[in-house]
Image: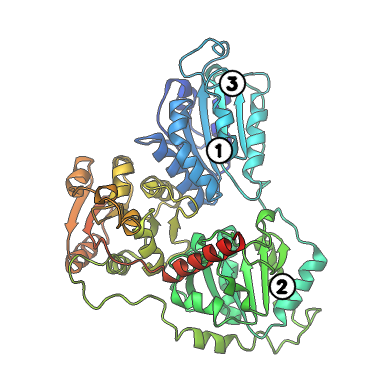
Amino acid sequence: MPNVSRVILDSLWDEGVSAFFMVPGKMINAFMSNYRAADPAGHPRISPVIAAAEGGAAAMADGYARASEGTGVAIALDGPGVANAVAGLVNADADRSPVTLLSGHVPRGFDAHDALQDVTPTGLDVAAMLTPITSSALQVRSARHPIRYWNITLRKLVECPTRPVYLSYAADVLTADTAESAISMRSLSSSRVQCDEQELQSVLATVNSSASVAVLVGSHANKKDVRQLLTRLSESHDILVGCTVDAKGAFTESHPNSVGVFGYSGNLRAIELFTEQAPETVLLLGCRPTQWNTNAYDARLSRAKNVIEVTSAVEDIGNFSPGSRTLLCDELLFLRHWEDSLTGYGKGYGKDAGAKFPWNAELGERTRRIPLYVPLPDEDPGAMHPGRAVECLNKWLGDRACIADSGNHRSFATHYWKTRIDAGFYSSTTMGVMGWAFGAAIGVSFAREEPCLVITGDGCALMSGAEIQTAVRYRRNIVFAIFDNSAYGATHMNNKENLAELSVLPDHDWVKFAESLGAEGFRVNTLDELDTVAQKIKGDGGVQVLHIAVDRDAATPARSYQENLRSFARSKSENHA
C-alpha cells in the first residue's frame, strides 16, 4: 500500500508534471524517498530539482506552471523553508500562476510543546500567513483521510482565475499508508466557464457585422489551443492582433498581423491602433485590468464604436475598459463559436458570406505604416544602449524563449524583443519580484525542454544569481544576459535627487561569478563585442553568462505609460480635492 507522499507524487505524474523544485529538509524526507520509483514501463517518474534557495524553487515552479500551462510544484520544509518561498508565492498569486507549494511540518503530538519549527496554530501558524496569497492553505494533522485534502487542493488549482495553493502534512502523516486515491485534475481543467447562449449570439452578431475588427489578447487567453485558433482566425480574416504586457508572445510578434504589445513599454503600432486608429470593434480577449496592461488606464481604449470584453475571470469583467460590453465566457470556447459563426456565415449572424470585415485589409495597411519601436539613438556616445543590446540578442538568439526579469531591462525587453516562437516571452508583471527570472527560466526549460534566454540586471543577479549553479547542475540550455548598469536601474531613474548610494551598485565581475558556479562567462562592453559573442554561442548548449555593460541613464520606452499614469493621478487628485 503506498504512503501519502507516494500517492501525491503519483497524482502529479499522472497530471503530466515531470519535475518538482525543492530544497531538502528532514520533515519532507517522505517526498525525497519516493520519487525514484519507476512506472510499469520502467520510465523514471517525477524527478526532483534541488534549488539553491526556496525562493528560487518557488520561481522555478512558477516558470514551469506558465510554460507547461499546468501546475508547477515546489516542495519545502515548513517554517523557514516555506517562509523563504513566500515572495515567490506572492509573485505567482499576483500573476495568477497555479503554483503548488507542498511541505512537511512537525509530527503529530509535537504541537503545543514549543517544538522547533512548529508551524501549527500553536506556533507560527503558517497556514494563516499564506491564506491571503493562495486559494487554499491547508495543514493536515490526521492520517484518517489524508488524500481528501489533496483532492480539495487539486480542485482549487483549476478554479478561475488560477492561484497558488499550499498544502502541508505532519511528517509522520506523509509516511502513513493510505488506500485513498487522488482525483484527476485533467478532467476538471477543460473549458469551465460556459456562456449564456443568447448573449453569446448577440455578441457574435455585433462582431460579425463590423466593418473592421482587432483583437487585444490578455493572459487568460495565453493558452496553446487559444493561440493556435486565434492565429487561424487572424490569417483567414486579416485580423490585427496585439497583446497586453502579461501576454506578450501569445500572438507571435513576427507574424505580419501582429501589432506588438499594448501597455507599459508597449509598441507604437499597438498603442496607435487601439487608441487612435481604432477599428469599429475592439475585442478584448482574456485581458486583466492592471495599470500596466491598460497603459496606465488609458481612457482612449474606449474610442472604438464597439469595445467588447470576453473573459473567463468574473472579477475582471468590466474593469479593463470601463463601460465596455462584457461577456463571461471561456476564451477558447468563444473563439470556437466565433470560427463556427464565420464559417457558417448567413446562418443567423446578420450578414451574407461576401462581407467579412471589409475594412480590415485597409486598416492593416494603414497600421503597418506606423513604426513598431521607439527609435534608438544613431550612435551610443558611451556605454551601450540597453535597447541595442536587446535587438542584438534577438537577432542571434530569437529562437529561444525569453524570460525577462524586473527592472529597467524589462522595459527594453518588452519593447524591443520580437517573439518568433510560440509563447516566446515570460515576465513577472504584476508584482515584479527582482531575481525571479533566474529560477523561472529553469522551470521554463524543464517544462519546454527548449533553449532559454534570461534578460536580467546586476541588482537581480545579486539577489538570485546563485541559481545559475542549479542550471549548470541540471545541464540546462540557458543564456543569462546580465545587463550591468552598476545600479538598481529603475530606482536610479526615480532617485536622482537623493543620495547616489541609495541606488548605485559597485562593479562586479559576473564572468568570474559565473565561472565559479560552473558556467561559461563573457564580458562585453560594445555592441560589436556582443554581436560577436551572441553569434558564437548561438548553437551552443549548456549555461552561458553574458556580462553586458549598458548605459545607466538610457531612457526607457515607456513615455506614453508615464504620461497616462500622471494624467490618471491628476484626475484622482482632482476628484478628491
Quarter of the rendering containing residue 254 = bottom left
Q: Which residue is mark 2?
A: 340
Query: Up-down: is 457 above or below 370?
Result: above
Residue 77, horizontal then vertical, whole percent: 46, 26
Residue type at tag 2: Asp
Q: Earlier in the sequence, mark 2 or mark 1?
A: 1
Q: Is residue 56 above or below residue 277?
A: above
Q: Quadrant of the N terminus?
A: top right
Q: Quadrant of residue 16?
A: top right
Instruction: Answer yes or no: is residue 36 visible.
Output: no
Q: Select label 1 or label 3 by which is in front.
A: 3
Identify the element where label 2 is drawn: helix
Q: What x and y, as percent, mark residue 198?
A: 82, 67
Residue located 65% across and 85% down the image: 357
* Mark 2: few/some/many CA within 10 Å (<14, 14-19, 20+): few
- The local crowd at label 1, few if under 14, some if 14 to 19, many if 20 or more residues have their Cα within 10 Å, is many
The residue at which mark 1 appears reads as 12
Name the residue: 79% across, 67% down: 199
Q: Earlier in the sequence, mark 3 or mark 2?
A: 3
Q: Secondary structure at mark 1?
A: helix
Can you identify the residue that label 3 sits on?
A: 121
Amino acid marked by disc 1: Leu
Marks 1 and 3 sit apart, C-alpha to C-alpha, by 28 Å
The front one of 541 and 41 is 541
Q: Quadrant of residue 107?
A: top right
Q: Calculate the distance from the C-alpha at mark 3 to the C-alpha at mark 2.
A: 54 Å
Q: Residue 140: percent from the left, percent from the top?
A: 61, 23
